Amino acid sequence: MDPERLWSRAERPRRGRPPAHSRAEITDAAVALADAEGLGAVTMRAVAGRVGAGTMSLYSYVPNKETLLELMIDQVSGDHRLPAEPSGDWRADLRQFAQEQRVIMRRHPWLPGALSARQTFGPNALAALEYALAVLAPVDLEAAARLETFSLLTGFVSSHVSYELAQERAVEAGARASGELLEAQDRYLRSVAAEGRYPHLARALAVPSHDSAPQAVFDRLLDRMIDGLTAGV
């Protein structure tokens, strides 16, 4: 996939009749389908059906599904509500940026999985990246390290949201009520820790448990993540 062809060249008007659809309309339809039914439901045939086009005619707007996925990722990246400029409190700004990422990924549950296949950055994703790098500008890190910090932060949010969604799906599927499952897990861990073979685990379990609400867990782990990313700064 040539990113210059994808992002730097606007859709050119065709000769003759105006096109019946646009790349933006097709991307909208693909995102709506993925939101409703998952990324696996996004096929060229299904998207064509949503916009009322023939499957083959869709290829004149989007050459393949891989390109469509790039367009989808960049479109939802535009959901970021980015301030005009960072506040100057880089830790607070980085936390807020990660919180925005979590909201967007939960709004579009297919996004965490799709990010691992992303090949390029579109204009919306570049705007988010530029803002995150501006947030990190006051930190005593090399420019390349700031890019790596952005990648690590995004990877953390993506992984954690995937875990949250998987847990919620398990409960919805009726495998077991979440409270019962957590109690069973706790009993098991405490029983094996009491055997004396896992002293470090036993000490960890002896500490009063933290708030297990999803938002509280995310906030706690995010703080640790940010502290770790910038250790020694």
Image: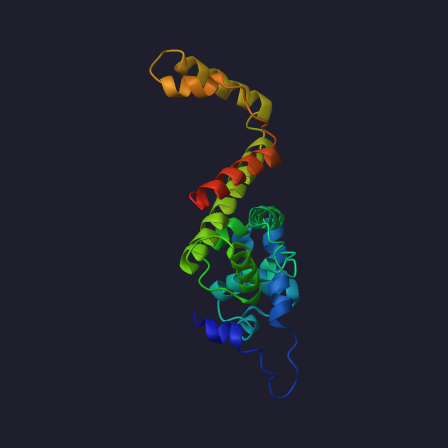
Residue 22: x percent and y percent? 63, 73
Position of 9 compared to 53: left or right? left
Q: Nearer the viewer, residue 228 or 12?
A: 228
How is the structure coloured here? rainbow
- The picture places residue 172, in percent across and down from the top left corner, at 60, 33
Spot occupied by residue 224 in the image (x, y as percentages of width and height): 49, 38
Q: Is residue 160 above or below residue 117?
A: above
Question: Is residue 200 rendered to the left or right of residue 184?
Answer: left
Say if residue 73 shows up in the picture: yes
50 to 215, vertically: above or below: below
Residue sitting farthest toward the top = 195
The residue sitting at 56% across, 38% down in the picture is: 218
Spot the residue most to the left.
197
In what quadrant of the picture does the N terminus appear?
bottom left
Identify whether 28 is placed above or below 202: below
Which image quadrant for residue 77?
Answer: bottom right
Query: Where is residue 2 shown, x and y percent of the image?
Result: 44, 72
- The quadrant in which residue 45 appears is bottom right
Q: Nearer the viewer, residue 104 or 87?
A: 87
Answer whether residue 53 is visible to the viewer in this image: no
- Residue under the point 43% across and 43% down: 231
Looking at the image, residue 178 sits to the left or right of residue 140; the answer is right
Query: Closer to the camera, 102 or 172?
Result: 102
Label count reads 0
Side (left or right) of 183 relative to 107: left
